[in-house]
Image: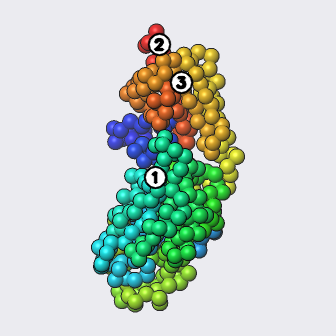
Amino acid sequence: MTIYDRLSLRPIVNAKGTATRLSGGVAQPLVREAMAEAMGACVDIVELQALASTRIAAVTGGEAGLATAGAAAGLLLGTAACVAGLDPARMARLPEVRGAMPEAIMVRSQRNQYDHALRGAGVRIVEVGLPDRYAGAGCRDAEPWEIEAAINERTVLVHWVADAQSRPALEDVVKVAHAHGLPVLVDAAAQLPPQANLRRFIEAGADLVVFSGGKALGGPQGSGILAGRQDLIASAALQMLDMDYPTGFFRPPAAFIDAAALKGLPPHGIGRVAKVGKEQIVGLLVALEAFIAEGDEARFARWLSPLQTLFDELAPGFDGGLDLRRGGAVPLLGLYPAGGAEAAHRLYADLVQGEPVIHTDPEELDLGAVILNPIALVEGDVARILARLDQISHSRS
């Protein structure tokens, strides 16, 4: 009997991918074992985070790193670091600031629900550019000069969201921002794999970069990575850690946080609501190590295997088309039921409302496709999907 059986909660078949609303992915056994072991003893969290900083820096190329409570927490902490620096008085006031509200510049076509984390740290987002290429009105998007034109004395950072379609290029954004002494914060939450992206953004000049720990990286769902400049990582850490120390007893490793450079200790900071526990930190580090050891090619083959089985089993009798996509960082299987978009919507509904509950990616339903992502599939899920599709087919015949 599983824990979910004891809680009277039925597991789902997650062919959507590592969506938070579906509880993310499934950690490998070595990650689960490491987390369980970590929960059996107490350690100094600052020392553990300092260790995490060293290991994260080694794989990202940053000066330092921080284990966070997810990617959105990393955005909040990164923004707070850009606003407050190493000034404990500023840390204590956030999200309130003295004088005019600080501003973060962001390309309009990159706005998304997660930039609420920036606003939560007390900044106002200033949009630049007109995304004509998305509106169908032309081919242009924001350009570097538009970012530069928006910079003023209130600007504290430039925010760039990583995607293959993001414009302007990160290197051009960094050039403009650094010319004015401004840091660039990159949201790369879902940019793994490929493994090379762990280093790509800092190599391009980003000052801070955020990754999710609970997506393809395979770590705890409530974990993330913030990597980059040592002073900004120190500020982010100070605004998340438990700061209830007797006077003179906060003694972090100097390479992580230089306590001698502080005017004093801040109180619990704005990131205290997003604390990360020892088990999340350990699980993240073990997952990060395993992600690198496995490599992109072996990981892709592991993900492709269940989709290939589904394709081979469905191809002879599926009423519609199948598309096994091998061209991206993650393989996908597209089901195109006969009847176009209406049939795709109906198939999606039948899967999610049936038994077992099977979640798929709804992003292309209007294009007539039900998309299956393999990352969160577990043993037995392929058989469950095939059985449910066969059941649906017979119910309609």
Task: Judge whether 118 appears above or below 247 on screen.
Answer: above
Of badges 3 and 2, nearer the viewer stands 3
Q: CA distance from mark 1 to mark 2?
A: 50 Å
- Tell me if residue 25 can be seen: no
Of residue 258 and residue 107, the one placed in the foreground of this image is 107
Q: Amino acid at mark 1?
A: Leu
Type of amino acid under label 3: Tyr
- The picture quadrant where one finds residue 77 is bottom left
- The Cα atoms of the two marked residues, 3 and 2, are separated by 17 Å
Q: Residues within 10 Å of mark 3 (few under 14, many from 20)?
A: many
The alpha-carbon separation of the residues under discs 1 and 3 comes to 34 Å
The residue wearing badge 3 is 336
In front of the other: label 1 or label 2?
1
Q: Residues within 10 Å of mark 1 (few under 14, many from 20)?
A: some
Quadrant of image for the N terminus: top left
Tell me: 328 left or right of 387.
right
For residue 394, the mark is 2
Give the label on residue 130, or none: 1
Secondary structure at numbered mark 3 = strand
Question: As displayed, is residue 276 above or below residue 379?
Answer: below
Amino acid tagged 2: His
Q: Position of residue 339 (x, y in %)?
A: 48, 18
Q: Residue at x 56, y 81 (%)?
A: 255
Q: Is residue 364 visible?
A: yes
Q: Earlier in the sequence, mark 1 or mark 2?
A: 1
Q: SS of the residue at dot 1?
A: loop
